[in-house]
Amino acid sequence: LGKYRIVEEIGRGGMGIVFLAEKNAEGVTDYVVLKTLKTLSPRHVEMLKKEANIATGLRHENIVKTYGLEAIPFADLPASFTGEVQNVSFESAQRKIQVRRLSALRHVGHAPRRLVIRRHAPAPAGAPKKDDRKLYMLVMDYVEGADLGDLHKEHLQLGLLLPVPLAAFVISRMCRALSYAHETCIHRDISPENILLNNQ
């Protein structure tokens, strides 16, 4: 998984931490979101895989594209990184970091933090059991913009309401996406924080 370089944390919630990452394929750079997922049991992992399979099959202009699920053995990751991911609690308040515009990231001086993954040789017979847990990460398209919750809060702080044409446009696009998605699955987490508005 050396193809990803973590640029910065862009959010966290009860299930894990979300990172903006740079993906390099043969000298072509793109930005994706790596959403780390806290797994609690083998049953939870199976549910996660099932949901990831459904998400990768959704192809709609108003649904963020999911590219797949990556799984990395905890033993191959730095302890500081896995500790940070595992210590995210379900009660923790969401924390967001203002993400720089992608155009700013492409300028000289941008130095992403490389996530170093080490492949270890198999343990000799009789050695203590290796940690067989894995860190699961959803790889998703990066939407440069804001979420509806933040946009609404900004308007309230300024004593304004969202303009009616903008609100109607957003709702119509949400309805289109949900109508399409609900042919396959039921989205059970519709909230202003999960509605992304790109800069365009």
Image (cartoon, grey):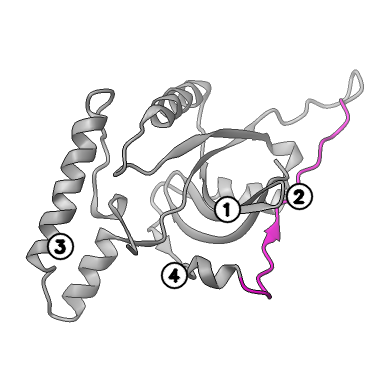
Gap in angstroms between the C-alphas marked 1 and 4: 19 Å
Part of the protein shown in magenta:
107-122
Q: Which residue is mark 3?
A: 166
Q: Is residue 182 above or below residue 17?
A: above
Within the image, what quadrant is residue 129 found in? top right
The percent position of residue 41, horizontal first and vertical second, equals 51, 26
Q: Earlier in the sequence, mark 4 or mark 3?
A: 4
Label 2 CA crowd tier, 10 Å (few <14, some 14–19, many 20+): few
The type of residue carrying mark 4 is: Gln
Local SS, label 2: loop
Q: Which residue is mark 4?
A: 98
- Give me the disc on residue 116: 2
- Residue 105, magenta (yes or no): no
Q: Which residue is mark 1?
A: 30
| Residue lying at the far top of the rendered structure | 125
Taking 161 as reference, is 49 left or right? right
Gap in angstroms between the C-alphas marked 4 and 3: 22 Å
The type of residue carrying mark 1 is: Asp
Q: Residue at x 26, y 31 (%)?
A: 181
Local SS, label 3: helix
Q: Earlier in the sequence, mark 1 or mark 4?
A: 1
Local SS, label 4: loop
Within the image, what quadrant is residue 126 found in? top right
Gap in angstroms between the C-alphas marked 2 and 3: 43 Å
Which quarter of the figure is the N terminus placed in? top right
Is there a contact, CB below 8 Å, between mark 1 and mark 2?
Answer: no
